Image: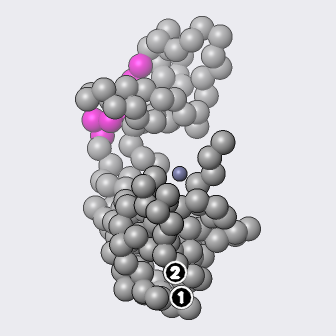
Amino acid sequence: MHVESQKVVILNYTLTDNDGNVIDQSTDSSFAYLHGANNIIPGLENALHGKKAGDEMNVSVSPQEGYGERDDTKTQRVPKEMFPEDAEIEPGMQFHAQGPNGETIVVNVTSVEDDVVTVDGNHPLAGVHLNFAVEVIEVRDAAQEEIEHGHVHGPGGHHHD
Ligand code: ZN
């Protein structure tokens, strides 16, 4: 069975940047996603198309095919008083904020100086060239419910309450 739309793909991966630093990897359990449903970044999904269980490969993904280029206009300096009074604001914290079109975006606090908090709405991996070492473990048909939900259920996938 080959990887194509409406197949569940189970894989192991190691993700490194161009300096060889490990950014992420599947360790305790394999990762599962629904092919063709935008569950993963386009560069990796395209490279997996047509593969089968047992295939191993290295995939190099540019920011355009990954999490996008960094956009400096998404960095903002915000008065500290905009945050809840009892909140201890520290670099590395994440907040949900409203984007220009009303969508919910995640912003990361990158620095706190006196009364000014700098937040960054870029994805932490924006502008980063991604190198995946991937091993395809299994390819299976998606269940009807998985296709309707647009994601994988069960081990390595989505869990509903
Ligand atoms: Zn679901």
Q: Is residue 110 above or below residue 31?
A: above
Q: Residue at x 34, y 31 (%)?
A: 103
User: Type of residue at label 1?
Assistant: Ala
Q: Is residue 1 above or below residue 22?
A: below
Residue 121, by quadrant, is: top left
Residue 93 rendering spot, x and y as whole percentages: 58, 33
Tell me the quadrant of the picture where the C terminus can be found: top right
Q: Which residues are magenta?
A: 72-78
Query: What's the coloring here?
Result: one colour
Q: Is 79 in front, or is 42?
A: 42
Which image quadrant for residue 10? Answer: bottom right
Place of residue 148 in the rendered image (x, y in percent of width and height, measured from the top left): 42, 55
Residue 99 appearing in the image:
yes
Residue 79: name its quadrant.
top left
Task: Report if the CB atoms under discs 2 and 1 are less than 8 Å apart.
Answer: yes
Q: Is residue 70 left or right of residue 132?
A: left
Per the image, is 160 magenta?
A: no
Name the kind of residue labelled 2 in the image: Val
Residue closest to the eye, 11 or 152:
152
Query: Which comes sooner in the sequence, label 2 or label 1?
Result: 1
Q: Which residue bears the numbered disc 1?
A: 53
Relative to 128, is 119 above or below? above
Q: Nearer the viewer, residue 153 or 85?
A: 153
Residue nearer the viewer, 82 or 103: 103
**What residue do we see at 60% from left, 23% from top?**
89
Query: Looking at the picture, does residue 44 appear above or below residue 136?
Result: above
Q: Which residue is mark 2?
A: 139
Is residue 39 visible in the rendered image? The answer is no
Q: Residue at x 46, y 49 (%)?
A: 124
